[in-house]
Amino acid sequence: MLRYDLHLNPIPEGHDIPGSFWGDEEAGVINNQLYYRTDTPIHSVLHEACHYICMDQQRREKLNTDAAGDYDEENAVCYLQIILAGCLVDYSYEKMFKDMDEWGYSFRLGSARRWFHEDAQDAENWLITHRLIDENLQPLWRCRI
């Protein structure tokens, strides 16, 4: 996450995760600090990281727990977390789809996989417009301006 100037901060087992919107084992983010425990799901870490990446600089500077993005940005966050999942060692798009479905992300077509492949053109376009991915769906390793 250092490419995005987002710093990962492990939290000891049994401690609350600072900046966690959902609580429990879900990742948290405050400014450019992303917090997690060993029981935090990868999809949660990537989702919070992608909120940080997708918000504009003014919101990033004030970020504390609630990303407060709009509908289009939330879709872009979900799309980007799938793209970034494919960049991780020992993880994949398929694992991300499964994890998102099991956690309870809800999409009109009933699954993360179907949404990504059949109903997410708006999210893809949003990410391209904001220069976060290219036309080949590759991350550009930069935050939204």
Image (cartoon, grey):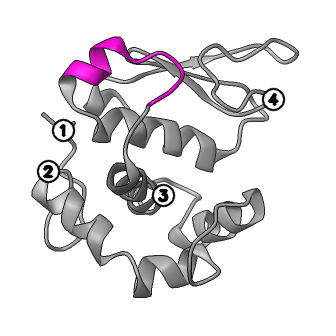
108 to the left or right of 1: right
Say if the magenta span includes residue 101.
no
Say if the magenta span includes residue 65.
yes
Per the image, the residue denoted by label 2 is 130
Earlier residue among tags 3 and 1: 3
Q: Please provide percent x and percent y for residue 21.
A: 63, 28
Determine contact: label 2, label 1, CB under 8 Å: yes
- Quadrant into which the C terminus falls: top left
109 to the left or right of 32: right
Q: Residue at x 75, y 30 (%)?
A: 38
User: Marks 2 and 4, Cα distance to the nearest angstrom?
Assistant: 32 Å
Per the image, the residue denoted by label 1 is 144
User: Marks 1 and 4, Cα distance to the nearest angstrom?
Assistant: 29 Å
Q: Please provide percent x and percent y for residue 42.
A: 62, 46
User: Marks 2 and 1, Cα distance to the nearest angstrom?
Assistant: 6 Å
Q: Residue at x 24, y 55 (%)?
A: 139
Looking at the image, is mark 4 or mark 3 nearer the viewer?
A: 4
- Which secondary structure lies at badge 2? loop
Q: Residue at x 51, y 44 (%)?
A: 46
User: Marks 2 and 3, Cα distance to the nearest angstrom?
Assistant: 20 Å
Q: Please provide percent x and percent y for residue 19.
A: 59, 17
Q: Which amino acid type is shown beneath numbered disc 2?
A: His
Q: Which amino acid type is shown beneath numbered disc 4?
A: Asp
Per the image, the residue denoted by label 3 is 85
Looking at the image, is mark 3 or mark 1 nearer the viewer?
A: 1
User: Marks 3 and 1, Cα distance to the nearest angstrom?
Assistant: 19 Å
Earlier residue among tags 2 and 4: 4
- Which secondary structure lies at badge 4? loop
